[in-house]
Structures are given as structure tokens and as C-alpha cells.
Image: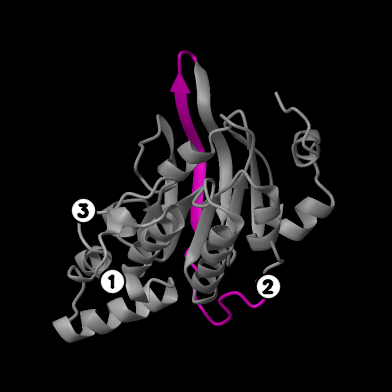
Amino acid sequence: MRELPILAEAGQGASHAGIEAKGLRIGHNGGALLDVAHLALTGPGPTMILGPNGAGKSLLLRCLHGLIAPDAGTVRQDGQKLGAAQRARQAMVFQKPVLLRRSVAANLDYVLRRRPLGRAARKARIAELLAEGGLAGKARQGARSLSGGEAQRLAILRALAAEPRILFLDEPTSALDPAATQAIEMMILRAARRGTRIVMVTHDIGQARRLGHDVAILHRGRVVEHGLAHDLFAAPQTDTTRRFLAGALVI
């Protein structure tokens, strides 16, 4: 896959949402599935969350989005405790896209109908979104008949239609070929440049290098390292991070 442009100018002039977790803990059978003392995501992003299987990456994402209530700790967005008002400015796309049983265009219209837009404005916005995702010729096609890459692009477009301040992505390209992956990565970069705060779980170190402004490494539910992508990849500060990035077994 060819290298994507670096996000050096990401969101210049845009106000990026910040999200912060303190004392976040989810326990199970006397142990901890998630134990995050402090994680502050305040830069422009994208933030890439990496770690071995079972590290708690997806669980952390669900806590930050408010889908799962932690046993202890708090999540704040722009300084405010995470609640309904904050969650309304977030969106999340899962590893396996969940699409409505209707046309591609109608999936987008479902979201736009909840915004103060007239019919003509909705139609124009749908056309813009479809063009953005390379789906302009599939507006009337059933959403569930799309290919895997197309379905994931539609899921991301539908999330972006709500104009979220923060978009959480849980391994959105894990089952896709290189061409489909690149198309989605370009969508993510464009959204980030427009000011959407991206927080993304990935198992792909190369992808984290291509997209990440900052990177958080999780292991056994804990954030073992968090820093600017360039610095972390060039000089990891913990043995766990060094071993993970080298492809060694991390237990």
C-alpha cells in the first residue's frame, strides 16, 4: 500500500474536542479488564490505540463513548462529565458495520432527518456524502448488498453525517483488502483535517504510523505508553511497547 500524506496540517484553525479518562476501571472475577489511571486526548488526532489481543482496546473505546459504564472513574469531554449532551456530539463505527435494511441513500437520510434540514438540503448533503465515499452510483442499492469495503465506507459516512466532534472507530479495516483499506484511510484523514476528532483502535502498526498523530499502547487493560506517533515509534519508552512494536510476544 502506498504511503498516505502525513497529517501535519490536520485541522488547522479547527477546534478539536478533547476527551479525558481518570481512574477508569472495569473489573471481572477479582481482576481488571480495564484499569486506566489517566488518559488525556487533547491534540488534533487521529489517536491510534494499539495493543495485543485482549488488551482492552475496544473496551476502552466503548467506555469513552459511554456505551459501557465503568465500575469506577470518570470520562470528560471538553471538561464536562460525559453525559447525554456530550454523547450526542460523538459517533462510533464498529469493526463489522451495522447497516439499516434500506437503500444506501436512505441510511444517510435516516441520520439527516434528525437535523434541522429541509428535504432539498438533505438531498444535497446525501449527494455530497456519497461522492465523499465513492458511492455516488450506489444510492438506490440496498445497503446490505454492498461489499465489505463499501459497507464500511457507508457506515463511516453515516457517522460523519451527524457532524460529530469525536468519531470512535473500532478496527474499521481489519477484514478489508489493501485498496479498500486505503480508501477508508483517506476518508479518515479528510475527516480529521475538517476538525473531527478521531480515536481509532487498530491492530495494524503500519496503519498507526500512516494515520496517527498520537498513539496509546494498551496492555492488560492499562495504558503503558502514550505520546506523539513519531516519537513513540522512533524511541518507545517502555519494554512492553518495544516488544509489541518488534512483533515479539507480549504477555
Quarter where residue 186 is shown: bottom right
Residues in magenta, as a range: 6-30
> Split into 4 quadrants, where in the image is the C terminus?
top right
Residue 221, position as x, y percentages in the image = 57, 31
**Dot in front, 2 or 3:** 3
Q: Which mark is residue 139?
A: 1
Residue 18 located within the stretch drawn in magenta: yes
SS category of the residue bearing label 3? loop
Q: Gap in Å between the C-alphas at discs 1 and 2?
A: 29 Å
Q: Residue at x 60, y 52 (%)?
A: 48
Q: How is the image coloured?
A: one colour
Q: Determine whether, in the image, residue 246 is placed left or right of residue 86.
A: right
- Residue at the far left in the pictured view: 119
Work out whether mark 1 precedes mark 2 in sequence or the reverse, and give the earlier one.
2
**Dot in front, 1 or 2:** 1
SS category of the residue bearing label 1? loop
Quarter where residue 74 is shown: top left
Picture layout, residue 219 above or below residue 22 = above
Return the residue at label 2.
5
SS category of the residue bearing label 2? loop
Residue 184 or residue 235, whichever sits in front? 184
Q: Main secondary structure of the magenta part?
A: loop
Residue 150 or residue 207, whichever sits in front? 150
Q: Residue at x 46, y 57 (%)?
A: 149
Q: Which mark is residue 101?
A: 3
Question: What amino acid does circle 3 point to?
Answer: Arg
Q: Which mark is residue 41?
A: none
Picture layout, residue 54 above or below residue 107 = above
